Image: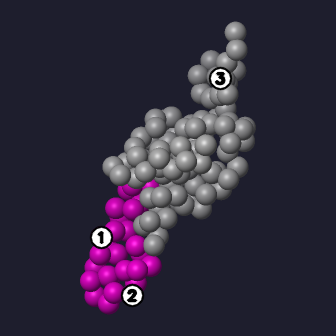
Amino acid sequence: MTQGPNPPVPGGTGAKKSSTGLQENAGGLLAYLLGFVSGIVLLLVEKENETIRFHAMQSTIVFGGLFLVGIVLNFIPIIGLIVSIFLAPVTVILWIYLMIKGYSGERYHLPMAGSFAEEQLKKFSK
């Protein structure tokens, strides 16, 4: 019996390994750990596990976008500061939530960013 590119890890957990040797749940968590930086790194090094690649792409899109929004807000005097104050805790909560979802092995799609991440992965896998 042959198995796909991501056979279950020995030990009965059902978690799939990746080309980097990471278990799927650890890779999902690491994709979000350093925001878009870890997302980009995992996109470059992970070649087989589609779930890890999805989390890495979603991390790159979401936290890269939030990083750019933060830079733009720094140039807007008063309103930018106010929006930044409210955006910071939302970003931290989102970061923690996505790390939990990534570690659980769930391929959780954020609105808009999740479907965009899927589309980008399809383009890169061709």
85 within the magenta span: yes
Badge 1: residue crowd in 10 Å (few <14, some 14–19, many ≥20) = few
Q: Is residue 71 above or below residue 124?
A: below
Query: Where, by quadrant of the figure, is residue 48 drawn?
Result: top right
Badge 3: residue crowd in 10 Å (few <14, some 14–19, many ≥20) = few
Q: Which residues are magenta?
A: 69-96
59 within the magenta span: no
Mark 3 vs mark 2, CA separation in Å: 50 Å
Q: Residue furthest bottom?
A: 77
Residue at the spot of label 2: 75
Residue at the spot of label 3: 4
- Going from N to C along the chain, the mark reached first, 3 or 1, is 3
Mark 3 vs mark 1, CA separation in Å: 45 Å
Q: Name the spot of residue 13 as percent of width and height, x first.
A: 60, 22
Q: Amino acid at mark 1?
A: Phe
- Going from N to C along the chain, the mark reached first, 1 or 2, is 2
Q: Amino acid at mark 3?
A: Gly
Q: Residue at x 70, y 14 (%)?
A: 2
Q: Nearer the viewer, mark 3 or mark 2?
A: 3
Q: Amino acid at mark 2?
A: Phe
Q: Nearer the viewer, residue 26 or 65?
A: 65
Q: Name the spot of residue 63 as percent of width and height, x first.
A: 47, 62
Q: Secondary structure at mark 3?
A: loop
Q: In the displayed structure, does residue 65 sit left or right of residue 124?
A: left
Residue at the spot of label 1: 86
